[in-house]
Image (cartoon, helix red, strand yellow):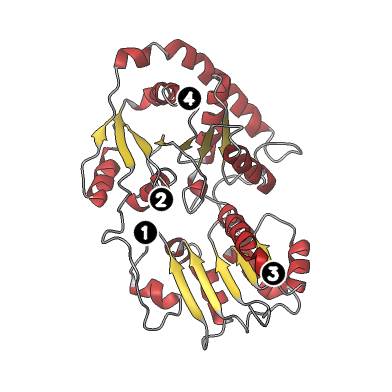
Amino acid sequence: MERQQKLFGLIMAPTRELAYQISQQFEALGSLIGVKCAVLVGGMDMTPQQIALGKNPHIIVATPGRLLDHLENTKGFSLKQLKYLVMDEADRLLDLDFGPIIDKILKVLPKEGRRTYLFSATMSSKVESLQRASLSNPLRVSISSSSHQTVSTLIQHFLFVPHKHKDLYLIHLLNDMIGHPTIIFTRTVNETQRIAILLRALGFGAIPLHGQLSQSARLGALGKFKAKTRDILVATDVAARGLDIPSVSYVINYDLPPDSKTYVHRVGRTARAGKSGKAVSIVTQYDVEIWLRIETALGKKVDEEPVVKEEVMVLAERVGEAQRAAIREMKDLHENRGKKGSVLRGRRGGGKRGRDDMDHEEG
């Protein structure tokens, strides 16, 4: 940094929220030595980003799709002088989704004199992934012998419930967690939005976070949760990786993740930095196979959460009313999708994703 070299380091991350978080840390830690940082992510106007690049930042934090857009379209922008490449959540960046874009980016980066670092809580050891990252004689540094190890301060329980009663058991759990910051993970955008509406109808301070929200709404949701003006964040896996949200007491897997790797990332949102935390996974009759696979990967049997069924069923009438209200509101949201001021953006699921979409989807 003594020579104030421009475009000194590049950090790539799979999601916009993680990219912003990383840039904030660089700006805070580098403020005393004048480190300049630019953030390149999708969903935002390219022009301010081009202006930021024109000021010759030392560090660029980017999602792959938007970075490639700038490499191809921003006049005068080049990474030929790059000295450090960092891939955060590297196993996600090296998978088939981002792979072709990463390949294009790596082709225009200098191979000589460049150091490359890959970070992840669940690193892939596949040779083809390491080759894609252009590593030569890589050194692997691991703080755990298991790729699916969770911290000792994390309590993990599961709840085996009939699928039709998932909402009832969720509300019962939350009644015991009132006042404690909680993240609820769901599988789809639709469920995330519905659960947030359901909880608000029942008086909980819940806010949704998913890929169909505008970028400003997503950052706003994270900001409110971090500031503790909302104590429940209902999220898709866009919030599972890397985000450092202090003081999350509980994680609830309303829907089980598709694989054990995502499970480790989800439950890792609590019990951070030596603090204790608890994760409860709701398992229905349709989830037994995936739950057994998760337990196998963890290398242990998870204890069942003690619940009195009669106490849960007392909530049926009140929750039923809230469910009907949530269904009505969801219908309105879908009818108004894409219109000005709508919560949900115009793009529906399915179809091929463009570069600008890749860093906001749920993976």
Q: Mark 3 and mark 2: span between their CA atoms?
A: 33 Å
User: Which of the two labelled residues, at mark 4 and mark 2, occupies the earlier sequence position?
Assistant: 4
In front here: 81 or 194? Answer: 81
Residue labelled with disc 2: 265
Marker disc for residue 34 = 3
The kind of residue on which mark 2 rests is His
Q: Secondary structure at mark 3?
A: loop
Q: Mark 3 and mark 1: span between their CA atoms?
A: 33 Å
The kind of residue on which mark 1 rests is Thr
Q: In the displayed structure, does residue 335 sit left or right of residue 83?
A: right
**At x 55% / y 81%, what residue is drawn?**
107
**Quarter of the figure with residue 314:** top left
Q: Mark 4 and mark 1: span between their CA atoms?
A: 31 Å
Residue labelled with disc 4: 178
Q: Secondary structure at mark 1?
A: loop
**CB within 8 Å, label 2 to label 1:** yes
Q: Secondary structure at mark 4?
A: loop
